Image (spheres, rainbow, N blue to C red):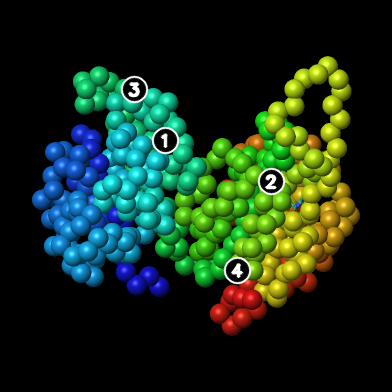
Amino acid sequence: MPDRSPSILLGVTGSIAAYKSLDLIRRLEGEGISVRVVATRNALPFFPVLPAEVFSGHPVETDLFNPRRPREEGGGRVSHLALLDKSDAVLVAPASADFIARMALGLADDLLSTLLLSATVPVLIAPAMEEAMYHHPASTGHRKTLLERGVVEIPPEAGPLASGKSGLGRMAPVDRILEALLPVLRTVRPPDGPLSGLSVLISTGPTREPIDAVRYIGNASSGRMGNALARAAQARGARVTLVSGPTDLPPPPGCDLHRVTTAREMQETLESLFPSHQLLIMAAAVSDYRMKDPVTGKRKKDGREWTLSLVENPDILKGLAARKRPGQFLVGFAAESSLDPSLLLEKCRHKKVDLLVANDISRADIGFSSPDNEVVLVTPSGEFRTLPRADKSAIAGQILDAVVAGGWPGHPAPFQENADGHSRP
Ligand code: C5P
């Protein structure tokens, strides 16, 4: 059971929208979330400090070195980490263009930027700036950098701006900020659920195998199914580690994210993480082949045929199955052009997985880049179950429920080996 209420660190930076942060603090406190505020110097002209202190019940912090701060909270010395210790997430609202740039660059020249450089909890930003600043390639690039690091953006909305113009750039309304933040807090402090206390490792997305400096062998996997599985596992109380090939999708907040490119990088990462997880779901579309000798630099056109020589990649799942310990459960995926039951059963047994999730790639309405899927679940003892077409979130939930229930005739319930209902290595 949680030993304290959820807490966030609210960063307020230099934007006219800083006056709205007061309402945000009240609403957060109303949701039972305790708030510590750190404001940058540029925020202060816009930010009503005293009311914020009254509503949050804590001083608004601005200085890296604050002798007035209690010693156990880092007072009297240059210690910023204490403010993070009790925070489940950091929300920067409003996040000015300047502050977003400083975050992206990893600067640490004031209290808020220093805290963010040390933060290991989820970070959310609610940008607020003039439209031209928002769309400037520099700002776009900085936001992209942050998104790639797992920062969640709560996009601004259109309307009247401080300049008197109208356009995109107003900080998202408080309701939308809460809509984004509350699920993140639920994942950091997971709800009680059938996977509480368990660690789930999920691979997702495609892999890319370089042909030369600019070309690669890839596939059409979007990463949606893996992300949906991550969310479904979090919603059931699990801690989730996501190993993702290159995708454009933002990872679900609250996951421990590991980005990889090639199959061999994915293999190395999964092999090191697998021993500390109880459930592995191998949803990634791993390239079966890589270049025997990738070309150095970019190969130039020379009017002649170009024959590529490929070698097989290791079968990551099979390798992990061979290292499986009692209490670990493996789910594999299979993208097939026909769902012949005997071939699926053969694959399930050959791969030594506890559950195979097969989908039919000959159908355009489901699978790879589609929001929907329809799958057949197969167990090594020969049980089959079709999960009819639904969006990937619904399918992900049903896959996890099937794993949790272990309701397969002749198949032991995977997580019910111990008295507490969870199997552990
Ligand atoms: O053999 P096939 O590619 O159909 O198997 C699919 C399953 O095996 C998926 O779970 C996929 O992530 C995994 N796989 C793997 N390593 C490979 C190829 C596939 O782990 N080299």
- Asked whether residue 45 appears in the rendered view, the answer is yes
* Residue 398 shown left or right of residue 188 in the figure: right
Residue wearing tag 4: 276
Considering only vertical position in the picture, is 371 above or below 36? above
Residue occupying image coordinates x 58% and y 76%: 421
Q: Sequence-wise, which precedes: disc 1 or disc 3? A: 3
Query: How far apart are labels 4 and 2 at the CA level?
Result: 22 Å
Q: Sequence-wise, which precedes: disc 4 or disc 2? A: 2
Query: How far apart are labels 3 and 2 at the CA level?
Result: 37 Å
Residue wearing tag 3: 132
Disc 4 residue type (three-letter): Ser
| Number of the front mark, 1 or 3 | 1
Mark 3 and mark 1 in contact (Cβ < 8 Å)? no
Q: Residues within 10 Å of mark 4 (few under 14, many from 20)?
A: some
Residue wearing tag 2: 262
Residue occupying image coordinates x 76% and y 38%: 294
* Residue 422 tag number: none
Query: Looking at the image, which residue sits at the far right?
Result: 342
Disc 2 residue type (three-letter): Thr
Q: Residues within 10 Å of mark 3 (few under 14, many from 20)?
A: few
Query: How far apart are labels 4 and 1 at the CA level?
Result: 34 Å
Total tally of numbered discs in the picture: 4
Q: Residues within 10 Å of mark 2 (few under 14, many from 20)?
A: many
